[in-house]
Image (cartoon, helix red, strand yellow):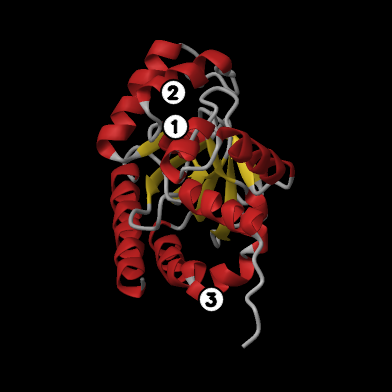
Amino acid sequence: MAKKYQAPIVKKAFIILDAISKNTHGLRISEISSSLDISKSTVHGITAALEDMGAVVRDSVSKRYTIGLTLMTLGKAAYERIDFKNIARPVMEDLMELCKESVFLGVRNGEQVTVIDIVESRRDFKISSPIGTTLPLMAGAVGKLFLSQMEPHDLEKYMHANPLVKFTANTIIDSDLYVKELEKVRQSCIAKDDEEYLSGVRAVAVPIKKYGAHIPALWVVGFKASMSDKKMPAIIEQTQFAAEKISKKLALEF
């Protein structure tokens, strides 16, 4: 019987990646070291190498490591195998037909949000962006959604290190008001953008639960003229229902 080849450092790297991937808020070096019983120096060396390759992302404020975009790129085939996007896609298409607006699917990647799928509106004038587009974490409805999931202490540090940027006349630039807005999002699991990132554009974002540690987001974006005050309640309800439907499909699949 052939001798099984051993590569301890590779094994430790995968163990570390596995631990990081299972923690929603990421892990610090000390937490990785204590939970896996691996020396801090070894963890530091491995995470530094993984960060250089984009396999993990280190938050400059909280010092926590989360999974990076490189793994998403390398894992494209795995995503296709587990049919995550294939499961979400039909629901996204149904949602687009209901609300007539563009529907996005995305994940947090460090201090950015990455679009991993989109179903464009059939309207002549619509909001769109290529798959792979990144958005600032402090921009729009989807940014609010991901920020609302941060631990209060980490959010405070993040806000201190990243001053609010005024994108439009409606952008919330008062930190206290913004934190209160995030608390509302945390409680309701609904984030709204009323011309706060792009003038004349509205959005609503909700989480897709039960998909590992990293919770994807589903959001609808359109012009204010079509996403009117009268239509917004129905669009929010339709988006919530779609996210719940995807969550249930994922639960059955996995």
For the point 52% across and 54% down, the residue is: 15
Looking at this rendering, what residue extends furthest in the bottom direction? 1
How many angstroms separate mark 1 from mark 3 (CA)? Answer: 30 Å
Q: Disc 3 versus disc 2: distance between alpha carbons?
A: 35 Å
Report the front residue among 142 and 93.
142
Q: Position of residue 235 (x, y in %)?
A: 35, 50
Q: Is residue 179 above or below residue 144?
A: above
Q: Residue at x 33, y 57 (%)?
A: 210
**Comparing marks 1 and 2, which lies closer to the viewer?**
2
Q: Could you tell me if residue 82 is visible in this image?
A: yes
Numbered tag placed on residue 60 in the rendering: none
Residue 132 in sight from this viewpoint:
no
Say which residue label 3 marks: 81
Residue 182 falls in which quadrant of the image? top left
Mark nearer the N terminus (3 vs 2): 3
- Nearer-the-camera pick, 248 or 49: 49
Q: Which residue is identified by label 1? A: 147
Place of residue 247 in the rendered image (x, y in percent of width and height, measured from the top left): 33, 61
Going by the numbered disc 1, the residue's amino acid type is: Leu
Which element is circle 1 on? Answer: helix
Q: Residue at x 45, y 58 (%)?
A: 100
Q: Are marks 1 and 3 in contact (CB under 8 Å)?
A: no
Figure check: 242 above or below 154: below
Check the picture and name the quadrant holding the N terminus: bottom right
Quadrant where the C terminus sits is: bottom left
Relative side of 17 to 181, left or right: right
